[in-house]
Image (tube, rainbow, N blue to C red):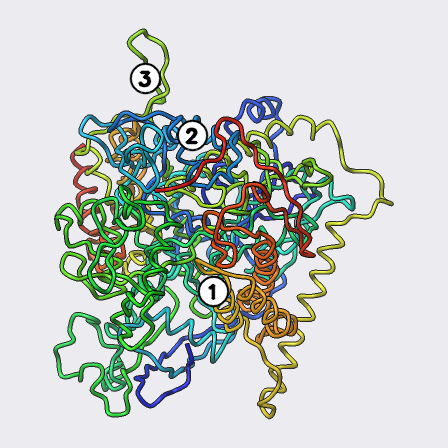
């Protein structure tokens, strides 16, 4: 569905229609300010732009749960959730943000339930909760059941309930539109709008807006093995970089320990929460050795590194589908889980294993391997969702620009995210960003933008430049098609192939561990081989409608911009913390690096101190 | 990753029904319940939808593939190594997002859950001698057809791909499923609960979840797993055949809320579907059940829904 026409000026444009974007839309329309505008007969103009149909958003693939200290099954306390989040993030967490996250989590989850989410239930009818890695009682004493769940398809339930409520609220969508540019004023102090490409028609639209929110999700597609959908190409983060903004802590990429062998498809942490055990080639349940007490439910970075240590030490196993291949997997042993219980609480995990590995988890050992899963860093935002630049030792907010969800970094995840905290972050801070935008609605009406014809319209200019680029690319397709017949050696790149090559480069440079040498090799490879190829890409069909190759060209360029920033930030951090393990700097260094990296498109890096409020850094052990 | 044909590698041939739209100045954006609807429906909007014009052709791609590869794997290999212009929707790649419903050998199903082993047919069996497409599909593999892998040249066979039936084709394997989403939207697909907040022992308002017993959840949980992929719609001879019918997907969504103990609008919801183009249009063919990727017995659920509506 697309808007019939594009308004001259929107009050609010939200880019992305997953948990964060839809929560923001609902947070806004359910706010008192919005109701006030409506009561005055002024319907604020709101548009949600997404490159997918909203129900296809990757939120729908989240499996295990959403964390909140509801205490429905066991006694729980938000202070413990707060502590676990800070510790899980290896103290690179802004504690004011994490406190809000833990404190407001129960209300956020109850709000989701009241919007229709079909949570699993306890016998007395309350929302059911299960254990999840890193979530504990009494400040790290023992595991606690904190993850509210809906079998193992909580993301699907949340995505659909949020979309359904947006239908009820009459939210307008522009579906399968790809945003190519974020436009700020010249001083980068204020947002002016976005440029969007309608993939259905090939039309480029200048979308002027008083408020823009980025909620485009993560960037797992930077890596060859990833649990992320094909669409998680880091678009929002790249848009911010290219608009002259920075990314915070972008060197922290979580590798989920249990990707299904070489597919990368996620097997939920719930598989281990319900009793699954990791074993090496010798059959040893090795996690007990790496994280006594927590074993298989230690934090994800700890488990991923342990798997890598085992495979590096020659105790890995090969994917049975490729017996002669690299022994870079370990076994997930689910045979100890009662088969009926397994089918009841882990139906998706069981189905995925049957379908994509042709194995039966009740009988067979399952090959698993760490898979790129979550981007902890992203566009820097305040707890109210405002995007800022870090300059001269202070946060300079960009007026009217907001972000939430995986593309953003409010810094509740620090150097490593706990399971169950991502949906919570997206829903909770998405809602907060929506309310922040609602609070700006009144001011917007008071300040008409019309008038001065001499002022340069930067959104129109950016759209015109993009239109020219589209025309040039499509013209190149026509020339290419004519030349193809007799010219086999035309330099003829393919964006899908290039994306795969970039994924391999990034994987060998940064997956699970890295060093100055691996980073340097990847930078050189990107600069000398990948980037020049990306610059010369053109589509091979000159039909603008549903020209997926055109979008793929922009996506691969976005991934290169983002990957380069990730390499720069990884290089600059001379320590190991959370998901970032530098083989050449294996220890955490709070003296120098208890700080957020702030990386711009030129590779310039600033350091912003971490907000330490209640909990001074401690050693992190599981 | 290479699409090149290596000696020890088996191959598969994908026969793809392609379509490229002709550029149109002003596209008619009206949405009809079905592209071929003969009569208007309160669920489908009234202006008949024009079929897009453009170039249609059939293209064959033969690539290296293993029996356990999914059809989506094969199409991505084609995009990467043979033809980047081939258009099809895909996203999560493991059956959760619902974006990649197409017709495989004529049967609506998801690209990412269909394997070469299940769907490749020896060339001769794609049509019979009169040129009719075989019916039956995956379940009748025990007939005279040689099973995959036995063909001397290493070919696993042919898979025929077309856009999801019952919806206008937009490009190659991409169909316009907005008519389905419009129909779902018309039936108020959102929880309408009483909104009452629970109170504490002292009588203070306490923000609290609606209570729901596991047995009450079980009455609609499976229905709530629908991913709106459109497979049931493309399989339905009434819907895909062009009759005015709200379609199985919208009915499943309606039933999901009718059977949710938290929802207060069951009676109104039943009224809304108790119409000629609602449940009365269902012919109980039950083709909708066959390939549901979420394991919903769509036909049986609609049968139960009809009984529920009639017995009010």
Q: Would you call the spot at circle 3 few (<14 residues within 10 Å), some (14-19), or many (20 or more)? A: some
Nearer to us in this view, A292 or A566: A292
Residue drawn 47% across and 33% down? Answer: A428
Question: Marks 2 and 3: same chain?
Answer: no
Gap in angstroms between the C-alphas marked 1 and 3: 51 Å
**What is the x, y in percent for residue A463?**
71, 56
Q: Which residue is mark 2?
A: A102
Q: Indicate which disc residue B198 carries.
A: 3
Nearer to us in this view, A191 or A289: A289
Gap in angstroms between the C-alphas marked 2 and 1: 33 Å
Quadrant of residue A180 within the rendered picture: bottom right
Q: Quadrant of the N terminus of chain B?
A: bottom left
Q: Are marks 1 and 3 in contact (CB under 8 Å)?
A: no
Count all numbered tags in the image, as a single digit.
3
Q: Which residue is mark 1?
A: A507
Residue at the far right in the pictured view: A454
Locate residue B86 relative to residue A43 in the image: left or right: left
Quadrant of residue A72 within the rendered picture: top left
User: Mark 2 falls on what kind of element?
Assistant: helix
Q: Indicate which disc residue A162 carries.
A: none
Gap in angstroms between the C-alphas marked 2 and 3: 23 Å
Name which of mark 2 and mark 1 comes first in the sequence.
2
User: Mark 1 falls on what kind of element?
Assistant: helix
Question: Marks 1 and 3: same chain?
Answer: no
Look at the image and tell me whether residue A174 can be seen. Answer: yes
Q: Quadrant of the C terminus of chain B?
A: top left
**What is the x, y in percent for residue A519?**
56, 63
């Amino acid at each position: 569905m697309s808007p019939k026409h594009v308004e001259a000026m929107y009050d609010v444009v939200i880019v992305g229609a997953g948990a964060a974007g839809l929560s923001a839309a609902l947070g806004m329309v359910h706010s008192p300010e919005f109701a006030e505008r409506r009561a005055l007969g002024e319907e604020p103009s709101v548009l949600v732009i997404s490159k997918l149909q909203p129900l296809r958003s990757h939120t729908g693939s989240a499996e295990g749960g959403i964390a909140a200290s509801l205490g429905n099954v066991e006694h729980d306390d938000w202070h413990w959730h707060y502590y676990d989040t800070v510790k899980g993030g290896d103290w690179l967490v802004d504690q004011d943000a994490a406190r809000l996250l833990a404190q407001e989590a129960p209300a956020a989850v109850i709000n989701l339930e009241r919007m229709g989410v079909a949570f699993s239930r306890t016998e007395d009818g309350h929302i059911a909760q299960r254990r999840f890695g890193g979530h504990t009682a009494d400040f790290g004493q023992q595991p606690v059941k904190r993850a509210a769940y809906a079998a193992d398809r909580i993301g699907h339930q949340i995505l659909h309930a949020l979309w359904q409520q947006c239908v009820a609220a009459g939210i307008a969508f522009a579906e399968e539109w790809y945003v190519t540019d974020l436009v700020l004023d010249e001083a980068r102090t204020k947002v002016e709008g976005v440029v969007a490409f309608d993939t259905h028609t090939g039309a480029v639209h200048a979308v002027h807006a008083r408020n823009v929110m980025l909620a485009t999700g993560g960037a797992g597609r930077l890596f060859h093995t990833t649990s992320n959908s094909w669409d998680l190409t880091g678009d929002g983060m790249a848009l911010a970089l290219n608009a002259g903004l920075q990314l915070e802590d972008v060197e922290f990429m979580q590798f989920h320990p249990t990707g299904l062998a070489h597919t990368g498809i996620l097997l939920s942490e719930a598989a281990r929460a319900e009793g699954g055990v990791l074993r090496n080639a010798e059959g040893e349940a090795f996690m007990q050795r790496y994280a006594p007490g927590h074993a298989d439910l230690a934090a994800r970075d700890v488990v991923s590194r342990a798997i890598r240590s085992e495979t590096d030490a020659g105790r890995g196993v090969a994917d049975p589908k490729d017996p002669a291949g690299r022994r870079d997997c370990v076994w997930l042993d689910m045979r100890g889980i009662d088969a009926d219980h397994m089918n009841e609480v882990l139906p998706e995990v069981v189905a995925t294993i049957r379908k994509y590995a042709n194995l039966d988890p009740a009988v067979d050992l399952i090959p698993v391997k760490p898979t790129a899963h979550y981007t902890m860093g992203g566009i820097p935002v305040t707890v109210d969702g405002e995007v800022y630049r870090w300059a001269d030792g202070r946060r300079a907010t960009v007026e009217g620009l907001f972000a939430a969800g995986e593309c953003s970094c409010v810094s509740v995840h620090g150097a490593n995210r706990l399971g169950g905290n991502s949906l919570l972050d997206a829903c909770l801070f998405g809602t907060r960003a929506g309310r922040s935008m609602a609070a700006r609605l009144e001011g917007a009406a008071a300040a008409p933008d019309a008038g001065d014809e001499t002022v340069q319209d930067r959104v129109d200019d950016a759209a015109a430049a993009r239109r020219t680029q589209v025309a040039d690319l499509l013209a190149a397709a026509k020339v290419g098609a004519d030349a193809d017949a007799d010219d086999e050696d035309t330099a003829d790149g393919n964006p899908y192939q290039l994306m795969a090559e970039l994924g391999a480069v990034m994987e060998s440079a940064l997956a699970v561990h890295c060093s100055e040498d691996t980073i340097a090799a990847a930078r050189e490879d990107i600069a000398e081989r990948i980037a020049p190829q990306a610059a010369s890409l053109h589509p091979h069909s000159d039909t603008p409608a549903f020209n997926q190759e055109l979008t793929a060209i922009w996506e691969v360029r976005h991934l290169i911009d983002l990957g380069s920033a990730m390499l720069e930030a990884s290089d600059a951090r001379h320590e190991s913390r959370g998901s970032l393990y530098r083989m050449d700097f294996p220890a955490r260094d709070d003296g120098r690096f208890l700080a957020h990296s702030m990386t711009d498109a030129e590779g310039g890096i600033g350091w912003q101190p971490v907000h330490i409020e209640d909990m001074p850094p401690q050693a992190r052990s599981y | 990753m290479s699409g090149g044909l290596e000696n020890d590698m088996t191959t598969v041939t994908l026969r793809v029904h392609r379509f490229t739209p002709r550029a149109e100045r002003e596209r008619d954006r009206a949405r009809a319940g079905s592209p071929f609807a003969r009569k208007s429906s309160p669920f489908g909007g009234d202006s008949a939808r024009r079929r897009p014009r453009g170039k249609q052709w059939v293209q064959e791609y033969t690539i290296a593939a293993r029996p356990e590869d999914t059809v989506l794997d094969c199409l991505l290999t084609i995009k990467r190594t043979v033809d980047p212009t081939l258009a099809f929707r895909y996203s999560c790649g493991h059956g959760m997002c619902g974006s990649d419903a197409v017709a495989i050998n004529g049967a609506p199903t998801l690209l990412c859950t269909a394997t070469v082993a299940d769907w490749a047919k020896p060339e001769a069996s794609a049509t019979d001698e009169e040129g009719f497409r075989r019916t039956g599909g995956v379940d009748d593999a025990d007939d005279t057809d040689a099973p995959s892998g036995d063909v001397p040249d290493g070919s696993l066979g042919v898979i025929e791909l077309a856009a999801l039936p019952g919806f206008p084709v937009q490009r190659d394997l991409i169909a316009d499923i907005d008519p389905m989403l419009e129909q779902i939207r018309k039936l108020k697909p959102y929880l309408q609960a009483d909104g009452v907040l629970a109170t504490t022992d002292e009588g203070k308002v306490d923000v609290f979840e609606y209570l729901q017993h596991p047995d009450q959840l079980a009455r609609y949980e499976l229905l709530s797993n629908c991913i709106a992929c459109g497979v049931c719609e493309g399989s339905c001879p009434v819907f895909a055949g062009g009759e005015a019918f709200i379609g199985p997907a919208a009915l499943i969504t309606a039933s999901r809320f009718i059977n949710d103990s938290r929802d207060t609008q069951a009676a109104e919801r039943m009224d809304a579907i108790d119409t000629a183009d609602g449940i009365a249009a269902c012919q109980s063919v039950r083709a909708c059940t066959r390939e549901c990727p979420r394991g919903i017995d769509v036909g049986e659920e609609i049968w139960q829904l009809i009984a529920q509506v009639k017995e009010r």
